Image (cartoon, rainbow, N blue to C red):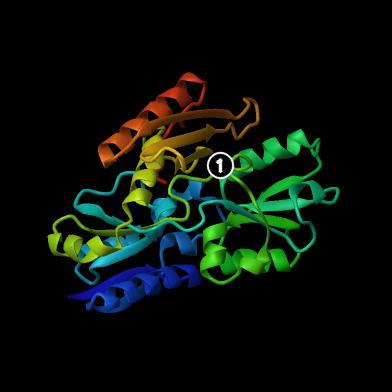
Amino acid sequence: MSITIATRESRLALWQAEHVKALLQGLGHRVQLLGMTTKGDQILDRSLSKVGGKGLFVKELEVALEEGRADIAVHSLKDVPMDLPEGFALACVMEREDPRDAWVSPVCATLADLPTGAVVGTSSLRRLVLLREALDALGRSDVRIEPLRGNLDTRLRKLDDGQYHAIVLAAAGLKRLGLSERIRHIFEPVESLPAAGQGALGIEIRADRADLLTALAPLVHQPTWLRVAAERTVSRAMGGSCSMPLAAYAHWHASDAGRLQLDAAWGDTEGVQPVVRVSGQAYVQDLAQAEALGQRVADALRAAGAQPPATSVEA
C-alpha cells in the first residue's frame, strides 16, 4: 500500500512517525510523512485544561485523515481523547516504552536534594498533586511547582536557561530521542503513578479504512493494548478530563500469567483532600475484560472520594 502518516512536527512526534514509517516500509509498504502544527503546539502560554484539553494535539491530524490527505495518524496515546470523534478509530497500539516519570535536573539528583525555594516544572496536574504530596511528606513547603509547556526540547531549554531547578517529564520521550543521560532519577509507579497510556503509541485511522486495519495488524502489541485499555477506561469513566489530576497504570503479574493489576490515583488540585488510591486486578484476555477492570477501578475511586470535574474537557 501507499500510506501517508499525519504527524505533529515536534522532534519527538517526528521520531515516532519515522519509527512507524520504518516498520511499515519493512512490511513492503510505500510510506511518506505529512508534518503538521497543531493548536496544542501553538498555544503555550496557558495550561491545556484551560484551552481545550489534549485533544488540541490531534484535531488537525484528524482533519487530514477526514480529507484524505493522510491515511493514518501516529499519536502518543496519552494525548489521544478517551472517546474519538465519530468516524475515527484506534487501529493499533504498539509495544510500550518505559511508562514512568523522569526527574531531570542539573542541580539535584532527587526531590529530597532541592535547594531552599526551588522551582519544579511540570505540565501535568497529575504530576503536580503527586509532587506536592511527596514534598509535603518531606516538609518542603518552600518548593514551588510551576507550569511548564512546550515540546520536549523547549522544556529542556527552559530548564537549562535556569527557569527551573528541576522538571518532570515522561521517561519514554527522553529515551526515544537518545536523551537518557538527562535523567537523574526515574520514579517507580509507587512514587509517581503514570498517566493512562503513557509511553505507548497509538495509530488512528478513519473507521471505514478496513484495508489499513490489515496493514497495521503486524504492529499491534496486544499485551500493551490490554493494559492501556484498562487505564483509559478509568479516565473515561472519571470524565476524561485533563483538568483532573488522575493516574492509571496497569501491569501484568510476573508470576501469574494473564492477571492484570490496575492501580489508579486521584488528587485534589487545591490540596484540601488527600490523594485517593485504589487497585484492582482480574484475568484479562480481551479488550472487553480490560475495560471491565477499568470500570471497576473507576467505581472504587469514586467510592473512595474521587470527584470527576464539574465540566469534562477531552484529554
Pick the residue in front: 194 or 157: 194
Q: Residue 278 placed where, x, y %?
A: 51, 28
Q: Is residue 148 visible?
A: no
Q: Residue at x 26, y 37 (%)?
A: 288
Q: Which residue is mark 1?
A: 193
Q: Residue 130 placed where, x, y %?
A: 63, 39
Horizontally, is 280 left or right of 151 in the view?
left
Report crowding for label 1: few under 14, some 14 to 19, many 20 or more residues within 10 A (C-alpha): many
Pick the residue in front: 250 or 146: 250
Pick the residue in front: 83 or 76: 76
Q: Is residue 309 above or below residue 150?
A: above
- Say what amino acid the circle numbered 1 marks: Leu
Q: Is residue 165 above or below residue 225?
A: below
Pick the residue in front: 315 or 169: 169
Q: Residue furthest top?
A: 303
Q: Residue at x 56, y 48 (%)?
A: 124
Element carrying mark 1: loop
Horizontally, is 191 left or right of 208 in the view?
right
Q: Residue 104 placed where, x, y %?
A: 68, 59
Quarter containing the N terminus: bottom left
Q: Residue at x 43, y 49 (%)?
A: 197
Horizontally, is 3 left or right of 143 in the view?
left
Q: Residue 202 placed where, x, y %?
A: 35, 57
Q: Is residue 253 visible?
A: yes
Q: Quadrant of residue 170?
A: bottom right
Q: Is residue 148 above or below residue 26?
A: above
